[in-house]
Image (cartoon, coloured by chain):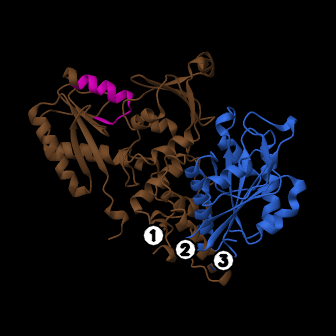
């Protein structure tokens, strides 16, 4: 079996306002989806970040959740007696099979053909530098308020909030986004407490394992760095330097780079997602294969590098560091 | 103890870039320095001496060999010492002061000169004093160098902080190592 075919999208479905029977049928339907290589978790709406909402639009709780989901552009299935003209709707007495079929359709549209799971949080989506769209977006979450300017690649903090707080909330699905004009931005210039490059934010996110970055790039295409990223020496683990160095020279598939750099393949995928999302992926087509140094001069140079690297505490994947 | 031709690391940069401080922050021993008082017109609040020849120090490697570390002024009138210091260097780190008005031209010039003298060496750039230059953007500076054909590790560094100088050296070593494994000249 190829590694690609073993990828299971992990989907979180949130429920709101459902009766006991529809909720139970939904959970059984989700277990059926495992046969289609779809791994689904069911949570209460608001309990954690979700990819899909299933709600009864006749209940207050369900109706409020549907409004929020619309703002978040979250795919929604209504399970109630009131048909919706805008959303797929099933009766509360729908069978497990019907529910499973509707969910399968929603998940497939969400996941696409890539086999990768779903959307980023609204903030991370706005921070993507691999999309051509520019413009100014005001992003708000509780007391955190910031202006994203993708044209200049900068985030302006409009309230005095530590960058660490922003990073920890980056994956929150409840960010509210509003497009604003340059005139609005000019009027609020005096509110700016600090500015950070979007590129550096992505590289800070690399170290935050709780932020899921898997949705940033759908394809497992080879990746090469177009330029050395803006790194903060105080927060970046030096182990990434080896992988970054290889990516500066050539394009790599995750598995090949993991093997060469000695870094876990899952972590390398995370790194490649950041390369893509930070806008630093080069379009270079060729894919590299590691070749051992053959000339005496190259071998001597490699030996020297390994000795010095060891002295500075840098673990390079090579004979001198075995 | 045996010594090795390749065990040489060079810092180069203009006056005030932080070469002496960087060499000192990673040295095992007290560096040999040739600092002299600056003329009155050139003194600043934070700098009253300058290196007129070079800085030299060593770091001991695990097997007792020495890594020779040089700090070389980037001023053109001192270029007579560049070839002898750079010959066989493992890597060359160009330090540039973020507040320097001609930082891009100076950096390009140093990269061109030193890559001609040490064609097998790898380079990295450390930008110092970035905290004092409000309008400095590392990304803009990097992209300008990229447009000029220089694709290499570049980062902000506080030369007084050993861990930051260490990180810059690690980036240079990783870049050199990857290139040697891929046999990229």
Q: In the rendered structure, which segment of residues is drawn in magenta? A: A62-76
Which residue position holds label 1?
Answer: A259
Q: Secondary structure at mark 2?
A: loop
Is disc 3 surrounded by few (<14), some (14 to 19) or many (20+) residues within 10 Å?
few
Chain on which label 1 sits: A
The one nearer the camera, A245 or A237, is A237
Q: Are marks 2 and 1 on the same chain?
A: yes
Query: Position of B149 compared to A287: left or right?
Result: right
Circle number at residue A311 = none
Q: Residue B71: x percent and y percent?
A: 74, 57
From the viewer's side, name the closer residue of B124 and B158: B158
Give the residue at mark 3: B3
Q: Colour of chain A?
A: brown
Q: Nearer the viewer, residue B159 or A265?
A: B159
* Dot 1: element: helix
Q: In the rendered structure, are the residues bearing label 2 and label 3 in contact, judged by CB atoms less than 8 Å apart?
A: no
**Is residue A75 found inside the magenta-colored segment of the image?**
yes
Could you tell me which secondary element the residue under label 3 belongs to? Answer: loop
Q: Residue shown at 15%/43% (left/top)?
A: A27
Colour of chain B in the rendered structure image:
blue
**Residue found farthest to the left:** A21
Q: CA distance from mark 2 to mark 3?
A: 30 Å
Tag 2 subunit? A
The reply to whether dot 2 and dot 1 touch (C-beta < 8 Å) is: yes
Q: Are marks 1 and 3 on the same chain?
A: no
**Image coords of residue A140 (percent x, y):** 44, 25
Q: Chain of mark 3?
A: B
| Labels 2, 3: front one | 3
Quarter of the figure with residue A151: top right
The quadrant of the picture occupied by the N terminus of chain B is bottom right
Residue A162 point in image, percent of width and height: 47, 30
* Residue labelled with disc 2: A290
């Amino acid at each position: 079996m190829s590694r690609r075919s073993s990828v299971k999208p992990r989907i979180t479905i949130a429920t709101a306002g459902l009766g006991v029977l529809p909720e139970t049928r939904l959970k059984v339907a989700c277990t059926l989806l495992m046969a289609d290589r779809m791994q689904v978790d069911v949570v209460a709406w608001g309990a954690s970040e979700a990819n899909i909402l299933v709600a009864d639009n006749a209940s207050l709780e369900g109706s409020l959740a549907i409004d929020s989901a619309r703002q978040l552009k979250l795919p929604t299935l209504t399970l109630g007696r009131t048909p919706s003209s805008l959303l797929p709707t099933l009766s509360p007495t729908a069978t497990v099979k019907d529910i499973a079929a509707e969910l399968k359709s929603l998940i497939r549209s969400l996941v696409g053909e890539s086999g990768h799971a779903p959307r980023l949080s609204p903030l991370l989506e706005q921070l993507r530098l691999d999309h051509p769209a520019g413009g100014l977006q005001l992003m708000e979450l509780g007391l955190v308020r910031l202006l994203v300017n993708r044209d200049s690649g900068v985030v302006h903090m409009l309230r005095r909030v530590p960058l660490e707080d922003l990073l920890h909330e980056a994956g929150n699905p409840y960010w509210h986004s509003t497009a604003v004009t340059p005139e609005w931005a000019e009027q609020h210039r005096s509110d700016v407490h600090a500015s950070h490059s979007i590129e550096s934010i992505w590289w800070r996110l690399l170290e935050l394992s709780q932020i899921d970055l898997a949705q940033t790039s759908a394809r497992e295409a080879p990746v090469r760095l177009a330029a050395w990223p803006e790194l903060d020496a105080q927060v970046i683990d030096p182990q990434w330097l080896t992988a970054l160095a290889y990516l500066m020279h050539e394009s790599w598939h995750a598995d090949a780079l993991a093997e060469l750099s000695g870094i876990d393949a899952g972590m390398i995928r995370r790194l490649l997602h950041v390369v893509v999302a930070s806008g630093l992926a080069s379009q270079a087509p060729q894919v590299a294969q590691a070749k051992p140094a053959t000339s005496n001069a190259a071998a001597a140079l490699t030996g020297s590098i390994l000795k010095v690297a060891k002295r500075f505490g840098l673990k390079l994947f090579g004979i001198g560091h075995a | 103890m045996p010594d090795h031709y390749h065990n040489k690391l060079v810092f180069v940069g203009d006056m005030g870039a932080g070469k002496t401080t960087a060499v000192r922050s990673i040295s095992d021993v007290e560096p040999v320095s040739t600092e002299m008082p600056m003329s009155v017109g050139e003194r600043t609040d934070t700098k009253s001496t300058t290196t007129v020849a070079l800085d030299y120090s060593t770091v001991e490697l695990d097997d007792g060999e020495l890594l020779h570390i040089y700090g070389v002024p980037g001023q053109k009138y001192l270029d007579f010492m560049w070839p002898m210091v750079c010959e066989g260097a493992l890597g060359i780190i160009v330090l540039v002061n973020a507040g320097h008005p001609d930082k891009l031209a100076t950096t390009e010039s140093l990269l061109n000169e030193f890559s001609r003298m040490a064609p097998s060496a790898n380079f990295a750039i450390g930008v110092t004093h970035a905290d004092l230059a409000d309008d400095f953007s590392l990304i803009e500076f990097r992209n300008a160098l990229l447009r000029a054909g220089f694709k290499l590790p570049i980062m902000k560094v506080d030369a007084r902080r050993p861990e930051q100088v260490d990180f810059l050296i690690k980036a240079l070593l990783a870049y050199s190592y990857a290139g040697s494994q891929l046999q990229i000249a």
